[in-house]
Image (cartoon, helix red, strand yellow):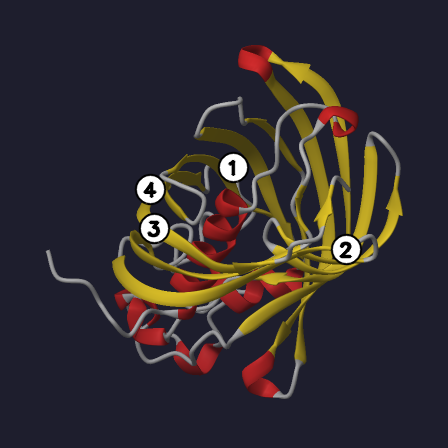
């Protein structure tokens, strides 16, 4: 099964976000008993994945990529779990950070429904995120809530604004004393009218007989159900996998001509190698 080695931006964004979250997944025990971890880690990962071009697309995209990764667990500066930025608040059960994260993006020809339309640019998100430890969960895990509110910006268009995204997420994760770790989360991606129009709007000049003009509106973009599984082979090597199911059922723009189906699935398998780490440890 050949892989596309010119991956779309959506594939890079989603794959690296899920991969970094899987690799940086911390212990499930409460913070006071969490074992120390290196202040920073430097490594690389290789990953193969398949996914829809965007929520609601019937076009499947296969991706293969090799990228470096960097984890930093400083008291203020943080680079882990899918974001890079500053920690504004930290208590035993609550954390607020402000930083960058990956966002959606794709080439126009990643989907036959968007053919002839401008490409969705290289997008990043920036803004605050609240994370709350909700307490003990089954199988020795922890329940956690994440509430990010972020502006979305197009790097390929002079950092132009593409609206706002809001994605409340509740998740369960566990990392027992052994080499295995796992996590499951459910989230709802909600976008402003500007962001929704970036993905689902059809301007009159791009309308065709099969693709009528459409003005997108604010609201739910997609539901997401994610699961990750990691296994530490030794101190430096780790394998990980993820699956994601997304659905536009009940979404604000499910009637857009760019929505071809109600649900889709993504999956990926990868390996990471840590080749440098700090001798200084932190439990923060």
Residue 250, label in figure: 1
Q: CA distance from mark 4 to mark 3?
A: 21 Å
User: Considering only order in the chain, which callout, 3 or 4, is on the residue closer to the N terminus?
Assistant: 4
**Residue 271 bears which disc, if any?**
3
User: Label 1 crowding class (10 Å Cα cut-off): few <14, some 14-19, many 20+?
Assistant: some
| Disc 4 from disc 2: Cα separation | 35 Å
Separation of disc 1 and disc 3 at Cα? 36 Å
Separation of residues labelled 1 and 4 (CA atoms): 17 Å
Question: Under tag 4, what secondary structure?
Answer: strand
Q: Quadrant of the N terminus?
A: bottom left
Question: Distance between the Cα atoms at labels 2 and 1?
Answer: 40 Å
Which quadrant of the structure image shows residue 34? top right
Between disc 2 and disc 1, whose residue precedes?
A: 2
Asked which quadrant contains residue 156, the reply is bottom right
Q: Is residue 232 above or below residue 96?
A: above
How far across and how far down the image is residue 57, in percent? 34, 54
- Name the mark on residue 265: 4
Q: Pick whichever of labels 4 and 2 is earlier in the sequence.
A: 2
**Is the residue under label 2 in contact with that under label 4 (CB below 8 Å)?**
no
- 152 is higher (above) or lower (below) than 256: below
Residue 255 on image: x %, y % = 44, 50
Secondary structure of the residue carrying numbered label 1: loop
Percent position (x, y) of residue 167?
A: 65, 45
- Mark 1 or 4, nearer chain start: 1
Residue most extreme to the left = 1
Pick the front one: 275 or 126: 275
Check disc 3 and report its element: helix, strand or loop. Answer: strand
The one of 182 and 207 positioned closer to us in this rendering: 182
Question: Front-most of 93 and 180?
Answer: 180
């Amino acid at each position: 099964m050949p892989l596309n080695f010119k991956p779309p931006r959506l594939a890079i964004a989603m794959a690296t976000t899920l991969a970094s979250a899987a690799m940086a997944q911390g212990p499930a025990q409460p913070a006071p008993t969490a074992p120390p971890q290196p202040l920073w880690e430097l490594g690389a990962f290789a990953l193969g994945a398949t996914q829809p071009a965007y929520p609601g697309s019937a076009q499947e995209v296969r991706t293969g990529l090799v990228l470096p990764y960097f984890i930093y667990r400083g008291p203020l500066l943080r680079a882990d779990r899918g974001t890079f930025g500053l920690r504004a608040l930290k208590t035993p059960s609550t954390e607020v950070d402000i930083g960058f994260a990956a966002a959606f993006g794709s080439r126009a020809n990643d989907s036959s429904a968007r053919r002839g339309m401008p490409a969705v640019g290289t997008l990043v998100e920036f803004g605050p995120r609240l994370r709350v430890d909700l307490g003990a969960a089954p199988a020795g895990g922890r329940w956690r809530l994440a509430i990010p509110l972020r502006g979305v910006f197009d790097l390929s268009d002079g950092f132009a604004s593409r609206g706002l995204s809001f994605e409340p997420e509740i998740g369960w994760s566990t990392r027992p004393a052994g080499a295995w770790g796992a996590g499951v989360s459910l989230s709802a991606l909600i976008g402003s009218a500007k962001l929704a129009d970036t993905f689902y709007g059809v301007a009159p000049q791009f309308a065709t007989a099969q693709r009528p003009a459409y003005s997108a509106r604010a609201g739910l973009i997609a539901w997401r159900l994610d699961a990750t599984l990691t296994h530490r082979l030794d101190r430096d090597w780790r394998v990980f996998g993820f699956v994601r199911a997304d659905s536009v059922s009940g979404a604000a723009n499910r009637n857009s001509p760019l929505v071809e189906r109600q649900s889709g699935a993504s999956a990926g398998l990868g390996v990471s190698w840590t080749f440098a780490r700090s001798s200084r440890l932190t439990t923060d």
